[in-house]
Amino acid sequence: MTTATRPLEGLRVIELGQLLAGPFACTILAYFGAEVIKVEAPGGDPIRGWRVVQDGTSLWYRSLGRNKKSVTLDLKSERGRELVLQLLDSADVLVENFRPGAMEAWGLGPEVVKARNPGLVYARISGYGQTGPYASKPGYASVTEGFGGFRYINGEPGKAPVRPNISLGDTVAALHAALGITLALLQRAKPGGEGQVVDVALYESIFNLLEGMVPEYDGAGVVREPSGTTVTGIVPTNTYRCDDGKYVVIGGNGDSIFKRLMTVAGRSDMAADPELADNAGRVRHEAEIDKALGLWCGQHSSTHVINVLEEARVPVGPIYSVADMLNDPQYQARGLFEQVEIDGKPLRIPAIMPRLAETPGRTEWPGGDLGSHNREVLQGLLGLDDEELALLAADGVIAPG
């Protein structure tokens, strides 16, 4: 294992909250060297029991909880909140994703914490942000993906919007939170710099993905609609079924690429047609182009289509499942899987991007058992003794063990 210094080493992050958005932001920070102390309720983060569970812990958590120190504290108890405040005194970053107002009700809001630790970067993740008329609404990813505009354009025209089988809103919000935290830390490092609040809303993170939709509507009154497997206004870029039942994605929307694509597909007439020489003309003839490519792909295997188009330097690729990814040499060559051990058994988990040439991130340990770092943190960092830990466990402030 490499021991190269990582960019966030020396920073201490306190993770509060549960499930996905806040925890994944902290996974990124921990991967790149931050000391992340994950504070869980004595019952644990619910994601420990979600989806595929082995030996009492979800395989998902083994990835999401990597490199984190698990500490149990009941934030509904006065003693639990006191201990969190003590942890925050020596922290650089706090990440929380509770309902807006919850931290203030517990006496852990930004003003209280800033008075004790002016340098703390206080990151808050919620469905609709900390302000505005919708701030108090519950905001799961599924709801905010709709409110943020993504679901409207995702799916087939005239049918119910489609949800991707991942919590996209949470993950995109986590990426924005990690970026915001990094920007705030850079600002803090300037002369006279202090900590600040980073306010991330799930719906705003989705909104940030919408490319030119706002100016297109405001300037021309155009509402982008769902377009199935295509992208509105860019032709051809689509998914086609081959004669082996598999699908390929073809991106032939560059002018010279289009000529090469249609020549290989046996339609030299379309390759030479001046009406199709630029994207504007191809958009007008989208149905005709897609029909020709669909017929050609339907006469050949996906392997043949990919091989001949790659030879012609046309962007093309398969539709991969996770099983395909694990067996692909490109994924392997790029180190996208890291192996950890769970009770002596190997488990592959995904690497975390981006890739840094000189100071790469790494997985040091998988997500561990609930409260597995109670003693290390509460004794080593806060100075509690064995008797105090026993009393905290007896009072339900921390998990026993």
Image: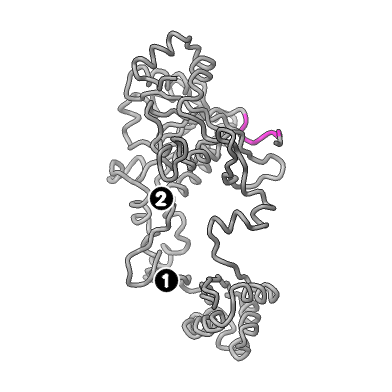
Residues under labels 2 and 1: Cα distance?
A: 23 Å
Main SS type for the magenta part? loop
The image position of residue 363, as x and y in percent, is 61, 37
The image position of residue 152, as x and y in percent, is 36, 63
Q: Is residue 385 left or right of residue 328?
A: left
Label 1, on which residue? 227
Any part of residue 197 in sight: no
Any part of residue 391 in sight: yes
Q: Is residue 188 left or right of residue 130?
A: right
Helix, strand, or loop for circle 2?
Answer: helix
- Compared with residue 20, is residue 117 higher up or lower down, i.e. above or below? above
The image position of residue 178, as x and y in percent, is 52, 41
Task: Identify the image quadrant of residue 96.
Answer: top left
Seen from the viewer's position, the closer of residues 57 and 145 is 57
Label 2, on which residue? 204
Q: Could you tell me which residue is drawn at 55 percent across and 70 percent down?
A: 249
Query: What are the residue bounds of the magenta stretch?
Result: 3-9
Q: Which mark is residue 32?
A: none
Q: Could you tell me which residue is drawn at 58 percent across and 59 percent down?
A: 324
Amino acid at circle 1: Ser
Q: Could you tell me which residue is drawn at 72 percent across and 41 percent down?
A: 358
